[in-house]
Amino acid sequence: MRLPGELGQAVRAIDDLKGRDILVLDLRGLSEATDYFVMASGTSDAHVRGIAESVLRRLDQGGLRAYHVEGLSGGRWVLLDFVDFVVHLFHPETRGFYQLERLWSDAPEIKPGA
């Protein structure tokens, strides 16, 4: 499935900076809060921050600003809320600890670019 507009741009920004284990979950019908979760890992706190800044910059250039940003200064888990989708960027240890994929295991996974 081809990802729509800004969601696709966010995933490409993550991929361009070598984000790992990129996952897009379709939460439509499962959550009132947002339509999609994007999850990816960086290799270090600095890498996670760099990916997050790249996503913010790319979407801002297209006229979409994050409604809410959390964790950017730390880089262990950065949350970028764009209302229709939320990007979660993790340090690998943090992603393994919280296991959001398991929490939302009933959500269909979308393969970016498929």
Image (cartoon, rainbow, N blue to C red):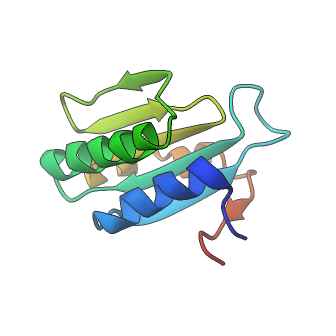
Residue sitting at x 61%, y 74%: 113
Q: Is residue 19 left or right of residue 28?
A: left
Name the foreground residue: 60 vs 83.
60
Quadrant containing the C terminus in the rendered view:
bottom right
Q: Is residue 1 visible?
A: yes
Q: Is residue 34 above or below residue 13?
A: above
In the rendered image, residue 110, in percent from the top left (x then y), is placed at 68, 64
Residue sitting at x 33%, y 62%: 19
In the rendered image, residue 63, in percent from the top left (x then y), is placed at 50, 35
Q: Is residue 66 above or below residue 28?
A: above
Q: Is residue 94 visible?
A: no
In the rendered image, residue 62, in percent from the top left (x then y), is placed at 49, 43
Quadrant containing the N terminus in the rendered view:
bottom right
Residue sitting at x 19%, y 31%: 74
Which quarter of the figure has residue 42?
bottom left
Q: Residue furthest right?
A: 29
Name the foreground residue: 67 vs 87.
67
Which quarter of the figure has residue 16?
bottom left
Name the foreground residue: 68 vs 98.
68
Q: Is residue 57 left or right of residue 68?
A: left
Tally of numbered tags: 0
In the rendered image, residue 8, in percent from the top left (x then y), is placed at 57, 58
